[in-house]
Amino acid sequence: MIKSWMIIGIIAFLVGFTGNWISPNQSQWFRQLKRPRWLTFESAIPLIWTVIFICGAWSAYIIWEHNPNSYTARLMMGLYLLLEIFTIAYTPVMLYFRSLIVGTIIGGTGLLICLLITLAVLPVSMWAALLLLPYLLWSPIGTYTTWEMSRLNPQDA
């Protein structure tokens, strides 16, 4: 029998992989943009997001196991999935539109979705809520960085 953590992990991996697969081949546009001088950690961003996605999947697993197959658990899994889709959509949608403002909006929307999920899971499990903390801490940094890049590259905002 397939365990729930395996299904959650596989879905998280497939959504993440699909997001990278459908990214338009316009990453050169993004690479040539000016960056803030304080952006010295750009090479660590993929690792940071990997940790955030693992924490998010673990949080989803805790919520699922609290009351498996219930309507509430299924609704929560849909919200977790929505959060991952918004997060993964950041790159391909921003590259497609060649717009840093679009990236900023997607980043801000992901933060709001994560905040709502955190508030919803807090009464059920403190651990599930705490596992969303990395997203809540990092997402504003990423969103602010994209917004700051739009100010440095007004032609690509």
Image (spheres, rainbow, N blue to C red):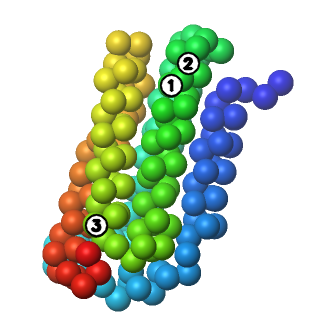
Q: Position of residue 69 (x, y in %)?
A: 65, 15
Q: Residue furthest right?
A: 1
Q: Nearer the viewer, residue 134 or 122?
A: 122
Q: Which residue is mark 2?
A: 73
Identity of the amino acid at label 2?
Ala
For residue 72, say whether it is visible.
Answer: yes
Front of the two marks 3 and 2:
3
- Contact, CB < 8 Å: mark 1 with mark 2? yes
Residue at 34% in and 73% down? 99
Residue at 21% in and 60% down? 144
Mark 1 lies on a secondary structure that is helix
Distance between mark 1 and mark 3 Cα atoms = 29 Å
Q: Which residue is mark 3?
A: 101
**Crowding near the residue tagged with mark 1, few <14, some 14–19, many ≥20 C-alpha atoms within 10 Å:** some
**Crowding near the residue tagged with mark 3, few <14, some 14–19, many ≥20 C-alpha atoms within 10 Å:** many
Mark 2 lies on a secondary structure that is helix
Q: Position of residue 94 (x, y in %)?
A: 41, 68
- Contact, CB < 8 Å: mark 3 with mark 2? no
Residue at 34% in and 63% down? 103
Distance between mark 1 and mark 2 Cα atoms = 5 Å
Q: Which residue is mark 1?
A: 76
**Which quadrant does the N terminus fall into?**
top right
